[in-house]
Amino acid sequence: MPQTKILEVNLLDPNHKNVLEAADTIAKGGLVIIPTETVYGIAVSMLEKEAINRLYKIKNRPKDKQLSLLIDKKEIVENFARNVPVAAYRLMDKFWPGPLTLVLEAKDGGTIALRMPAHAIALSIISVAGVPVLCPSANLSGKPAPKELKEALLDLNGLVDSAVDSGPCPVGQESTVVDLSVKPMRILREAAISTAEIEKVVGKKRVLFVCTGNSCRSVMAQGLLKKKLKDLRRSDVEVLSAGIMSVVGMSATANTKEVLQKQGVDVSDHRAVQLTKELIDESDIVLVMEKIHEERVLNIAPEAKNRVFLLKEFAKINDSSLDIRDPIGSSIDFYEDTLDIIKAAVERVAEII
C-alpha cells in the first residue's frame, strides 16, 4: 500500500507551496490530514460525494454521524445555515476563530455543524481550496483524536492522499460542540471551552438602540437604560447604541450631555458607532427612534424583523406618531422633551427585558 505524502508547513509561513498542494488535493476530491488548533482532522470537499463516502469508510464512522464544516470567515455562516439565533452570533463573536463547533439549522433542511478554526494553516487551506471543507478528527471512530500528525498516521498512513505536518496542535483538545438548532440549547460535547463560559455568553441579553447619528437620541436611551439596570442591580443585559449615518468617533452633543447629566448619567466618553449587520445579529432587541431607522435595520438584516421595534411603542404616550423626532439643532427645552419620551419608554423596556 502506498504511503501518505507528508507536506511539512511551518505555522509561521502559512502561505507555503505545500498549503497550495494540500488545498488542490482537497478541491479535486482527495483526503488530506490537516492541523487545527484543537486536533488534526481529515479534510474533504463537501462537494465530492465519493470522497465523503471514502472518508466514512476509512474512519469506520456511522453514516448518520455528522461531519463538521470548517469555514474561514464568519460572514459565510448564512450560506449554509438558516434561522441563526442571536446566541449563535454572540458565541461566534466571543469564541471564533477558536475551538467551538455550532450545530445550526441547515439551509437545505436538517442541521449542520460549523467551526472557524484558530489556525493559520487550516484557514489558508480552506481559503485556497475554494470549496466547502468537511473535517472530522483524523482518527478511527472510538480512538483518541490526534494532537500530533504521527498519532494520526498510526492508523491512517496510506489511507489518505496527503498530510500536512505543522507540529503539535496548540490547544490539543477537541472543540466544544453546542447545538443551537434546538431550544433550549444543548452542549453535546464539553471540551476546550467550558459549559460555564458558554452559558455566560448565552445568558446575557443585548439591547441595541438606533438613531441617525448616534449623538443624541440613542445615546440618551443607552445611558438611561444602563443607569436603570444598574439601579436594579442587573448585570445580565448589555446595552449598546449605533447610528445609521454616524460620523464614527464623534461625541454626544453638548445638549445631550447636559440633559443626561441632570439624570445622573455621564456620557462624556461616548463615541459614535456605525450600525452594522454584526451589531444587529448579536442583539436580542433593536429599538429604533423612527420608521426610517427600522427600514434601514431591516435592509441590512431582514432576518431581524421580529426583533426590531420603535422605542416610542413602549412609552404609553397618547400620540398618533410613533417617531421620536431628532432634537439635534433644537433648543435645550426640545432636548428635555425628547428625553422625557425616551425615559418613559426605557422604564418600560427595563421591566420586560
Image: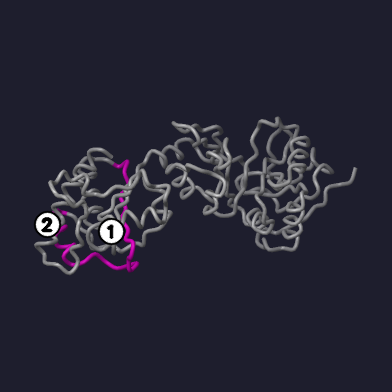
Query: In the image as oriented, which residue stretches furthest toward the left?
Result: 333
Local crowd size for mark 2, using a 10 Å CA cut-off: few (<14), some (14–19), many (≥20):
few
Question: Label 2 amino acid?
Answer: Asp
Question: Label 1 amino acid?
Answer: Cys
User: Is residue 162 in the magenta section?
Assistant: no
Residue 314 in percent (x, y) is at 21, 44
Distance in Å between CA atoms under marks 1 and 2: 17 Å
Residue hosting label 1: 211
Residue 145 in percent (x, y) is at 68, 38
Q: Does 95 sit left or right of 15 as displayed?
A: left
Q: Which residues are magenta?
A: 235-264
Q: Secondary structure at mark 1?
A: strand
The quarter of the rendered structure image containing the C terminus is top left
Q: Secondary structure at mark 2?
A: helix
Query: 32 or 243: which is nearer to us?
Result: 243
User: Is residue 240 in the magenta section?
Assistant: yes
Q: Would you identify the image quadrant in which residue 249 lies?
A: bottom left
Query: In the image as oriented, which residue stretches furthest toward the right?
Result: 1
Query: 179 or 243: which is nearer to us?
Result: 243
Q: Does 64 sit left or right of 190 as displayed?
A: right
Local crowd size for mark 1, using a 10 Å CA cut-off: few (<14), some (14–19), many (≥20):
many
Q: Which mark is residue 337?
A: 2
Residue at 86 percent across and 47 percent down: it is: 3
